[in-house]
Image (spheres, grey):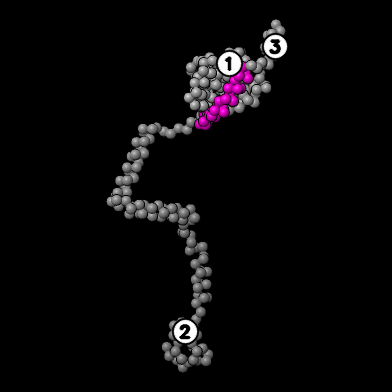
């Protein structure tokens, strides 16, 4: 529109001097729009944090699927075939092997079903040692030691006794050798249940302990002393 004072255009106006155009500032307009959009009524239907996280997760899954489909032979159809084949293989293995079960291994009995005398265990230990089978030699020598204590009635014959139990029981009656007995039982457990391998030094140490125990005199228990007094 033309007037005596000059021409008025959109977004511009003529100053008081009549010849200097001035731009209307956009900053107040942006601030006003931002204030308006910050009103909670505009965000009532926005997804919450959990929903946004789920959306991003599915977008990630979709991206993985699209990438795998592009790399698989045959595209999406080929990917489906591969997935079905993997599932079928897993089902076959599950059916063949059964449900995995977690078993906790606890120390078994010191002696197996084979009944041997102390001398028999010592001969077996010597044969293993001659062949360099130190783990088996240690096991048999420990059995010989405990069997000898049973034969001498230092220990009662108890089925299912472990090496640790034998060491504790014998240590009460042979206190001078209690620490070495516990060490021998620990070595036996380590090589029998812990997957460790014995060496010649372990075997020779056990042989020495066996000979010392054979020559040692046990303490009299209260029950034994009472029986002797009678």
Farthest residue, direction bottom: 4
Farthest residue, direction top: 230
Q: For mark 3, give the secondary structure.
A: helix
Which dot, 2 or 1, sits closer to the camera?
1
Q: Position of residue 103 (x, y in %)?
A: 48, 31
Task: Tell me which numbered mark, 2 or 1, is placed earlier along the sequence.
Answer: 2
In the picture of the structure, the residue carrying the numbered disc 2 is 12
Cα distance in 3D space between marks 2 and 3: 122 Å
Residue neighbourhood size for the residue with mark 1, other residues' Cα within 10 Å, grouped as few (<14), some (14–19), many (≥20):
many
Task: Tell me which numbered mark, 2 or 3, is placed earlier along the sequence.
Answer: 2
Residue at image position (60%, 16%) is: 149
In the picture of the structure, the residue carrying the numbered disc 3 is 225
Are the two marked residues, 2 and 3, in contact with CB atoms closer than 8 angstroms? Answer: no
Pick whichever, 1 or 105, lies toward us.
Answer: 105
Above-or-below relation of 146 to 60: above
Residue at image position (64%, 16%) is: 215
Q: For mark 1, give the secondary structure.
A: helix
Task: Tell me which numbered mark, 3 or 1, is placed earlier along the sequence.
Answer: 1
Pick whichever, 139 or 221, lies toward us.
Answer: 139
Residue at image position (32%, 47%) is: 80
Residue neighbourhood size for the residue with mark 2, other residues' Cα within 10 Å, grouped as few (<14), some (14–19), many (≥20):
few
Q: Position of residue 164 (x, y in %)?
A: 59, 24
Cα distance in 3D space between marks 2 and 1: 115 Å
Decide whether residue 230 is among the magenta residues: no
Which dot, 3 or 1, sits closer to the camera?
1
Q: Quadrant of the N terminus?
A: bottom left
Cα distance in 3D space between marks 3 and 1: 22 Å
Decide whether residue 211 is among the magenta residues: yes
Q: Quadrant of the C terminus?
A: top right
Which residues are the magenta region?
Answer: 189-214
Residue at image position (36%, 39%) is: 90
In the picture of the structure, the residue carrying the numbered disc 1 is 148
């Amino acid at each position: 529109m033309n007037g005596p004072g000059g021409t008025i255009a959109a977004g511009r106006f003529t100053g008081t001097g009549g010849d200097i155009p001035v731009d209307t500032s956009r900053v107040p307009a942006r601030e006003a729009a931002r204030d308006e959009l910050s009103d909670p009524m505009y965000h009532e239907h926005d997804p919450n944090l959990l929903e946004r996280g789920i959306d991003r997760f599915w977008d990630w899954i979709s991206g993985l699927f699209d990438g795998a489909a592009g790399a698989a032979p045959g595209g999406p159809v080929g990917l489906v075939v591969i997935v079905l084949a993997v599932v079928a293989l897993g089902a076959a293995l599950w059916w063949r092997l059964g449900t995995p079960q977690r078993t906790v291994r606890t120390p078994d009995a010191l002696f197996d079903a084979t009944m041997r005398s102390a001398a028999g265990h010592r001969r077996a230990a010597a044969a293993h040692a001659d062949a360099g089978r130190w783990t088996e030699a240690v096991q048999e020598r420990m059995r010989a030691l405990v069997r000898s204590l049973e034969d001498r009635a230092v220990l009662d014959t108890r089925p299912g006794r472990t090496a640790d139990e034998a060491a504790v029981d014998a240590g009460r009656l042979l206190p001078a050798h209690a620490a070495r007995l516990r060490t021998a039982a620990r070595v036996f457990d380590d090589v029998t249940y812990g997957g460790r391998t014995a060496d010649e030094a372990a075997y020779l140490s056990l042989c020495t302990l066996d000979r010392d125990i054979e020559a040692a005199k046990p303490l009299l228990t209260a029950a034994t002393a009472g029986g002797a007094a009678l």
